[in-house]
Image (cartoon, helix red, strand yellow):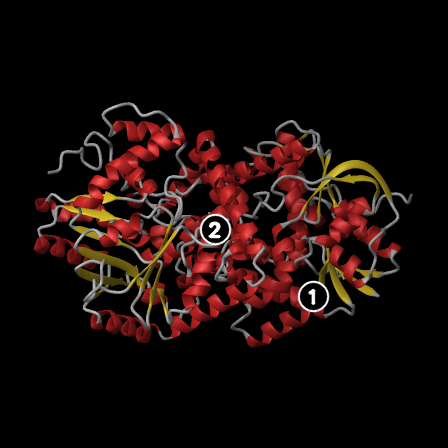
Amino acid sequence: METSKPARRRDTEDHRREGLESKVEGFNERGRKAVRDRKLHDSISLFTNKTLTGRNAQLRAHPDAPELRERAYRTKQETMANLDYYLSQMADAIEERGGNVFFADDGEDVVRYVGDLARRRGAKILTKSKSMATEEIELNRRLEENYDDLELEIVETDLGEWIAQLAGETPSHIVGPILHMNKERITEILSGVSDEDLPPDVESLAAFARKRLREKFVNADIGITGANFGVAETGTICTVTNEGNARLVTSVPPVHVVVMGIEKVIPKFEDLSTFVQLLSRSGTGQKITVYTNFITGPRGEGELDGAEEFHLILMDNGRSKLLGTEYEEALYCIRCGSCLNVCPVYRQTGGHAYGSTYSGPIGAVITPLLKGDREAKDLPYASSLCGACTETCPVGIPLHDLLLKLRNRQVEEGLAGRAESLMFKGFERTMKSPAAYKAGAKVGRLAQKPLVKDGSIRGAPGMRGWTDFRELAPLAEKSFRELWKEGI
Amino acid sequence: MRAALFIPCYVDQINPEVGVSVVRVLRRLGVEVIYPQGQTCCGQPAFNSGFFDEAREIGRRFLDVFEGERFDYIVCPSGSCTTMVSHYYPFIFEDLPEERERSEVLAGRVREFSDFVVNVMGVRDFGVHREGKAVFHCGCHQRRELGVLEEPRELLSNVEGLDLLDWENEELCCGFGGMFSVKMPDVSTAMADEKIAALEKSGADTVISCDSSCLMHLGGRLRRTGHDTRVLHLAQILDSDGR
């Protein structure tokens, strides 16, 4: 029955593990490469500028925007304080409607659950709609490897995710997975799985994708989605999309599996009015996305659509350990991606430089929180702390303050380099004593003498991080304090 | 009105002329200016790098030095260093009730230079003349933590002869970020280059800021890339001749 080519070309290199296997420590290295890539830069600017303009137009025009943000923050705060209650309420609601609920501690649990389900169902084709939770645990790769005897064909159906999958790449943005690619690159990738060379215009490419993905939609045995929100009181899963693929993934196959991070639960159905408004406006600059889906369990008696079997996997994967800590606010994130769009670092490097599933400011915060500081040493430092992220966050997460706390946590865990630790000990001693401070300045003035040329210091030892890129201004002949003493 | 100057360490040592202009401008407004001699640095480099213990030690000293003086306000020609005292001292002393209270008291009395001039002294027009086409770069702490964005713009817009231009994406960080500038120099410099591209497009010949640290980074990159754009602190502009 299935004659089309496999989802990923066999000769395509699999880059998916690169970011995850390499230490996130490589941010600087990857960032260096990224800032020299003009094509990447142009692609990022195109997406982020467009989304930001839309976001600003929508939220600034919204008279209740500050109230919405406040309400969202309070709702999340209250939810986290009673998370166990809301999760069990949600689980009860779903089970009452004939759905299955599984609490997964980690990615391994999720993979096993889905793999065993696929085996029991004799499934061959799994369609997926965009889900960062499954990216986080590398569900596709692990299913392919751990259940290789099932020869599963797992197909991403969000257009961007599908193209990333075909290219053997991970998404580089929470909302726009392939914003790092330009039209030419996309044409090349899609032509690679087509029988013919496709013309580089959006209509032809979209038509090709639609035709190819339809074959998968109608033949799928299991549909897998994430959840933008899960409502505790009703057990409703809400997905917010623009392509309609989530509808085909959830309504055509006989089985629907939802993989949802436990922090995505909200107490009441009416809370959706707050969160959906914020998510669509912040994420894509839309008042509301094209498709907003509400799914409550499997197909009920007398209902026309919905899956026969419904499974909700509530995934912890490191989240619950943040509850009640000073990092809890990181769990309030609704994955709108707006902190990435405004981040001047992200705008230069794109998402792959972060080497983690989640990039940008929120990625720099939650990656070390979920995976451990050692796994993400560079990320809290991948920020100028400008605060644009905090200003933009629709649920009020103090992102740049959390980055500061994470930097401090590394220092307290002894992860800072020895040289840096010694430097700041010396810095402290100097700054605690005006005499030492003045003496230090005096030494600096003497030391810089042979190095000053044309008003800049050249070749100062240990200063290449500055001097390789910019001119270094010398210490003034007389400090302000000296001028003050002499009389201003 | 008695103002205690808080002169950031890099202004003290690298750009003392900025401090001198601040003194002259404040005196012109009839402010009595004092300079507590025991001050050094607010500790921000350590704080931003995650060395909170070291920053606390330096912060305690800062509190001691300024608490020992009599003044109405502390005035600082840097949005960033002002923020360290007004926002981040209470942050790092959160769990230490005594220091937290002391820092909160001081936080209410420290003002960034343009904030002090406009909102405390009520002066919006200095009656000075200075030729040039300029853009204003607002440091990020000043913009977001302090919310002092319109004050410097208003002061500049009243400088006769000065053409204050708009520039693209003016709210973007310049890429300095303290230790970020040397820890991740490639990205930091790419950020500066984006600002410089916007600057070129604007046609300005001068960048003005309330933060000499941003200017050290932007100015250093401008010079390295062969630009002769001037970089000046707001106080230096207001310290121009009368019209």
Q: Nearer the viewer, residue A58 or B186?
A: A58
Q: Is residue B199 above or below residue A262?
A: above
Q: Amino acid at mark 1?
A: Val
Any part of residue A463 in sight: no
Q: Position of residue A236 (x, y in %)?
A: 31, 65
Mark 1 lies on a secondary structure that is: helix
Give the labeled residue for mark 1.
B65
Horizontal placement of A210 versus A253: left or right? right
Q: Quadrant of residue A233?
A: bottom left
* Residue at position x 39%, y 32% in the image: A202
Quadrant showing the C terminus of chain B: top right
Give the labeled residue for mark 2.
A286
Residue, far top = A197
Pointers 1 and 2 in contact (CB under 8 A)?
Answer: no
Q: Chain of mark 1?
A: B
Q: Position of residue A201 (x, y in %)?
A: 39, 28
Q: Position of residue B85 (x, y in %)?
A: 64, 62
